[in-house]
Each structure stands twice: as C-alpha cells, then as structure tokens.
Amino acid sequence: MGRIEADLASLKARQLPRWYDEAKFGIFIHWGLFSIPAFAPRLGSISDAFKKDYERAVAMTPYTEWYANAIKVPGTPSAEFHAKHYGNAPYSSFREPFLSGLKNWDPDAWADTFRNAGAKYVVLVTKHHDGFCLWPSATENRHEPGWVSPRDIVGELARAVCAAGMRFGVYYSGGIDWSFNREPLRTFADFVGSRPGGDYPSYAMAQVRELIDRYEPSVLWNDISWPTTLGPLLELFADYYKAVPDGVVNDRWPHLDLAARMLRYRPARRLLDFFAKRYIAKHPDAVEGVLPQEIPHSDFRTPEYRRFDTVQAKKWEATRGMSHSFGFNREDTEADYQPAAGLLSDFIDGVAKGGNLLLNVGPRADGSIPEPQLARLRFFGEWLKLNGEAVYGTRPGGGPGETASAITSEGLPVRITRGDGKVNLIVLGRPQGQRLVIRDFSVATAGGRILADGSPVETAREGPDTVLTLRLPPKGDFAPAIELRTD
C-alpha cells in the first residue's frame, strides 16, 4: 500500500481492507442519556413519520435517541410523556442517573454476548445528536460544560471487544449536535440545515482526532454530515489511515458547501420542505429507509432500514435496529421487533449482494440488554455457528447488477455466495424432504454437503435446473446452507 496523502486520488487508490469485507456481521450500540426516558412515538418506521406528519416528522420519529429534540416541540407524544414523568426537568437532568447506573454495566459481558452472536466487529455510539460524550473528552464544550462521562465507557468497551477477538469502531454525530444548536427541529429541511457553525467545526474535528488517537478504531463511522469544508476532511481521512492502516470510513461525511450554507437560512429551508413534501406525497413507496448521498470518498455505503436489490460494485453495510428504534424504547413489545428469521434473511440477502450488516443493540440505561434483543442475537449465533462458512470470507453470488438469487421448486428463495472452490446455496425457509430443485441454476460441481451436519449432497442437472439429493433431510432448521464444490 502506497503512502496516503490528503487528496482524493491517493485516498481512492487505497484498497478496502480485507478484514472488513470478510467480517459480514457487526453490532451497533445506541446507549446514552436517552436510555433513561427510553421513549419515542410509535408511528411505524422513520419513513412513516415523514409520510404521516411531515410538519413535525423529526420530532415524531420512532428513534428514542432523538428524545432531546422531540421534547422541545409542544404537543408531541414525547413532550407530553416528558411533562407527565419528569415535569419541567431539562434533558441534562438525565446525566447523573445515567452515570450512577454505570455501576451495573459489565463491558466484558457485552463483548461475550456479541462474540457468541457471531459478530466480528462492534461500533459504539460515542456521541449522538444530544452531544453527550461517552468518554472523558479533553475537548471542552463551552455550550454545555461537563457534558461528558467521567468514566471511559468507550475505552472500557474497546478493550473488552478487542480481548474477545473482535474489531472495535466508533460512531460520532458530526453533523448534528443539539448542545451547540438548540433550535427545535421539525421538518426534513430543519434537520439537514441544523449543522452547527461557529466554534463547532473545530470542536468536532478535535473530538474525532481524540477518538482516533486514544482508541485507534478499526471503523470511523460518522453520522449525518461533516461541519468543515472538503480540504480539512481529506486531511482527517489521511491522518486516520496513517494511524490505523486497516481502518475504514463510512459514507456519511457530506462536507460543508454552498448548499449547506444556504440551508442555515429559513427561506431556503422552507423551499426545500416545499419540494420534499410534494415528492413524498407523490412517491410514498420510494421513501423507505435512508440512503445517504454519495460523497467524494468513503470505504463503504450505509443504507439504513433498507438494502440494495442487486450486487453492488462498492462495498456496503446495511444498518438497522431490531425494532423501529435504535435506542431502547420502553413502549416496544415483542410485536414491534422484527422476527429473528426476518432479520437473518435480510442479513443473508445482503451478504449475497456484497453487504455487511451492522445490527443495532439498544441497552437499557443500566446496561442490561432487553430479552427480545438477546433472543435475536442468540438466533444469529446459533445459525452462524453451523453455517458461518457460507457467510464469513465469501464473495457475492453474482456480478454487479445481479441479484445473486434463485428459487426452489417449492417457491423458497435461495441466496448465493461464493468462496474458493465452492458455491454456497442458502435456502431462506425450511425445505422439506430429500430432493431440492433449484430453478434456472447451473454450476459445474462434484457434489457437496449440508454445512450444519456435514451430510453429503449429490447434484444432477434437469434442463436448466439443478437437482440436489440430500443424504439426510434438513433437520427443520431455518435457512440451511449447502456448500457445492466447484470444478
């Protein structure tokens, strides 16, 4: 690898680190002061909030980590909940209860849980939009003194995660900080136009460099946007790669430009809202999840609560919570969580198309992980323990623009991954019997095996189809993976 310079040509010439492409599965953690109230409206997904109540959408999202903004907007469910349970107490009043609850937190237990789930890396939210830092930052916030944790949550979890054999990464909210910009945000334009100016760009830059110097994170995961122009941002990337040669950065770093500056003014925001609202009304099906805009440099893209339909030329990482929120929501019931089989199917689908999954865990304020989330992590761990060879270290099952998929004669979807000398077929369901027909699929093969138990599989061709004869029927487990040896 050549010397990294702070210019686009040098940064783009850098290859994606192999570990990240092969890891496939990571854990995201949203935990902070917002975990004390642990409340958000339940309108459905974040997209549903913009479709149903655009004029208050930002304060109506299902994301509990946006509570500090939501309670500023009168009449919202969050404002009413806050008045009922906390009266006129400011959001900052949650600082001491959160810090007191840290006595119950065990970072090693978290690391064991994530490793047993099959995760290869963990990304912790070190500062979300509320601006509260989960490490004792030496960079002073003059707008909210003492807005840090005196206990080094970031450092303790980094050590535990690395000791458990996983990589550690940091999330930082670079584009939003409500301790600097306290204006209540209601609409899409309010949100994207609220990037702080003044002393914030130097503050954010100093904090991210502090995170790099202290923790050498394998993943540098920024959110929303970045408050400086392109030049200083490229210098940050170059310095990060020098400090962490096999590190990766995500795609949520849109730098400060003329359009971003214009959105600081209310008339420009209202014009953007006019067009955004019209677009959502006319194209509601097109507004699902979040897909960040492409930027001059990143190592991977980050669709949120959505996936790509085909194999992508660029590496990507789907991110989502297990329910509609990332932070823990006390109102969630089992019915609000995505079924474990659905989460696993989405993961397998993404891997077949070249993606990773960054699956979020939202702990309670005391550090305990809710049982519905633990159950899904166990489900992932049990499946990956038996079938991980069809996932870890594999390549997409097709070229860019292809679906990497097939279907059985029973109508069950099949996803395809490839490795050296093998093709893996993962059936998204529970096939019955000992004969499995894969429609319109052919590959030169010398037979294969079911990964879960090693039992042999014979192959034959019937016209355009491939027939798999299993020595033993699948045990009824969801999503059996079949490895075929290729000639």
Image (spheres, grey):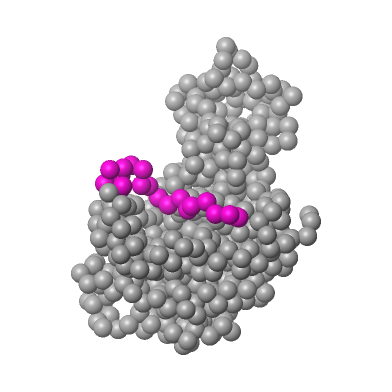
The answer to whether residue 294 is magenta is: yes
On-image quarter of the N terminus? bottom right
The answer to whether residue 98 is magenta is: no
- Residue 113 image-quadrant placement: bottom right
Q: Residue at x 54, y 69 (%)?
A: 228
Q: Is residue 439 visible?
A: yes
Q: Residue at x 74, y 24 (%)?
A: 487
Residue situated in front as seen by the camera: 208 or 325 = 208
Residue situated in front as seen by the camera: 477 or 51 = 51
Q: Where is residue 248 drawn, in percent x and y?
A: 64, 58
- Residue 73 image-quadrant placement: bottom left
Question: What kind of secondary structure does the magenta stretch mostly adopt?
Answer: loop
Looking at the image, residue 202 sits to the left or right of residue 291; the answer is right
Q: Residue at x 33, y 74 (%)?
A: 183
Give the magenta range: 279-298
* Residue furthest out toward the left: 75
Residue situated in front as seen by the camera: 52 or 25 = 52
Q: Residue at x 42, y 82 (%)?
A: 95
Residue situated in front as seen by the camera: 308 or 414 = 308
Whether 6 is drawn above or below 357: the answer is below
- Residue 190 image-quadrant placement: bottom left
Q: Where is residue 51 drawn, in percent x and y?
A: 28, 51
Q: Is residue 113 visible?
A: no
Looking at the image, residue 367 sits to the left or right of residue 247; the answer is left
